[in-house]
Each structure stands twice: as C-alpha cells, then as structure tokens.
Image: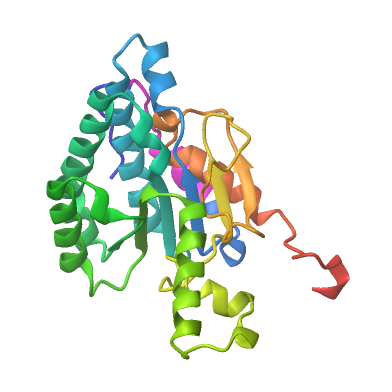
Amino acid sequence: MFFNNKISDRKIQLPQVMERLAALDKSKLPQHIAIIMDGNGRWARRKKLPRIAGHHEGIQSVHDVVELITDHIPEIKVLTLYAFSTENWGRPAEEVSALMKFLVKFLRQELYLMERNKIRYQTIGHIEKLPEIVQQEIAYAKERTKDNQGMILNIALNYSSKVEIVDAARLIAADVFAGKLNPEQIDEQVFSAYLYTAPLPVPNPDLLIRTSGELRISNFLLWQLAYAEIWITPVLWPDFREMELLEALADYTKRERRFGKVGEKL
C-alpha cells in the first residue's frame, strides 16, 4: 500500500501511520477536504532538479493521500485538489505542457486505483479550454467511474473561484430573464446551487489544507470555504504524505466548529 517513488528519499513507516490512524477520533473527522498543493517548484529547486521533477513527485503525494483515505478513512466523502488554476497559464509554456502531460499520465496510471477503491472522478473548472487529449482522458475517467459509490476525487482544473462566482451570477440572471426564477427567491442556498460544487454530496469543504507555508487561499473556493477550518503546513507538497495528512486530521478533530455561535449554543 505505502511505497516510495524513485525520486523521493522519504521512508514511510507503516507502524507509525497505523498508530496515528488508530488515535484519530473518527466521530469528528471532516467529510470534505480541500488541498492547495503548493511547493512543487521549490522542492525541485532545493534538490537542484528541474521544476518538472517537483510536479512528478507531487503525483506520488496525490497517490499516497488518496490511497490512505480510501483504504482507512471512509468518513471522508470528498477530496478536492487544486491542480491547475486559470492563473497557471502564465507559467513558462514548457512547464504548462509538461503539467498537461502529467495529468494525462496520472489519469491513465491511477484509473486502476479509482476503480479498485470505487472512487468517482470529478472536475471543476473550464475543462473545455484544456488540450484535447486532456479533455478526452478526463471524459474517459469520468465515464469509467461514474457509478462508483466511494470517495469523490474532485480535481480543480483551469479553475478560478472568481470565474465560478461570475458564472453562477450569469446562470441566475439567465433564469430570472427566462422567468424560471424570481429575484426575491435568491438567497445563499439558491446561489450555492449554481456553483460548480453543487452536485457534490458535501459541497463545502470542512477542512482546507495548504502546503508550503503560504498564508493565502489563491482564488480557490472563495464561497465554499467561508466556514472551513484552515490548516497550513510548511511542508512542500512533494513531501506531504500519510503522516502529514494524519497530523492535519488530528488537529481538526480537536477544534470546536462554532459557525459564528458560542460554544454552549451549538
């Protein structure tokens, strides 16, 4: 189950992972986790490797995190990963091209894991603007996993939360214009139903994890993260594995989620 990549020099000790798993309060675990996977380039630079090596190792982190959840933490129903933002198109062309190739490689290699573990693959973002080969692989993975009843692996690709909110406003305006919606009916619940995440069983993340120590949410799920717990780690994404995820979950279970209320009113 747990293994090392050729690039990585990390060694995961299974007994430690299982010990930390056993210590988790399963009744307080989040149902939806969102992760901003940051630090691939810095990881590669520190090791004097090409930036693309960091993205390659980051794929291993995705694999290990997904496998840990599906094998041992069924309480988590949705995992949303911020893989490629609309702003990422501004990176060097060769890096963007390599990222697209890695996405195709990831889908082809990990489809067996998704099928074995009954994972349903979903995406949010403007997929139609990605290269044709990427669109085809995404469509194939979605079709192959559409009936799976396990965890939803939700990947944000060519995603911008501001664009998502504008898209929702346009759809609402169109429905009002068509007479399908009364403006007086528009509230938070109605607005949320027009967001990309509306079809998910748990639309709003309970926990946001950001790696590499950056203290921002980078245009990611701005509406949905309104009451998410935030856990930031200095660990770079290629070094984020089972023990780091379990550390974040352990911290989450110790928090009191008040949603603006005082403790005794919960």
In magenta stretch: residue 68? no
- The residue shown at (15%, 53%) is 137
In-image side of 262 versus 123 (left or right): right
Residue 258, quarter of picture:
bottom right
Q: Which one is in front, 126 or 205?
A: 126
Q: Which one is in front, 132 or 23?
A: 132
Q: Write the start and end of the magenta stretch as one range.
A: 9-21
How are the residues colored? rainbow
Q: Is residue 217 above or below residue 93?
A: below
Point out residue 208 in the picture as x, y percentages from the top left corner: 56, 50
Residue 146, quarter of picture:
bottom left
Kindly report the secondary structure that dominates the magenta region of the rendered protein: helix
Q: Is residue 259 above or below residue 239?
A: below
- The residue shown at (27%, 29%) is 56
- The residue shown at (22%, 54%) is 113
Point out residue 215 in the picture as x, y percentages from the top left corner: 63, 35
Q: Is residue 107 above or below residue 198?
A: above
In magenta stretch: residue 12? yes
Residue with the most extreme top position: 48
Point out residue 126 in the picture as x, y percentages from the top left corner: 32, 55
In-image side of 250 versus 118 (left or right): right
- How many numbered marks appear? 0
Q: Is residue 87 above or below residue 158?
A: above
- The residue shown at (20%, 56%) is 138
Point out residue 229 in the picture as x, y percentages from the top left corner: 65, 53
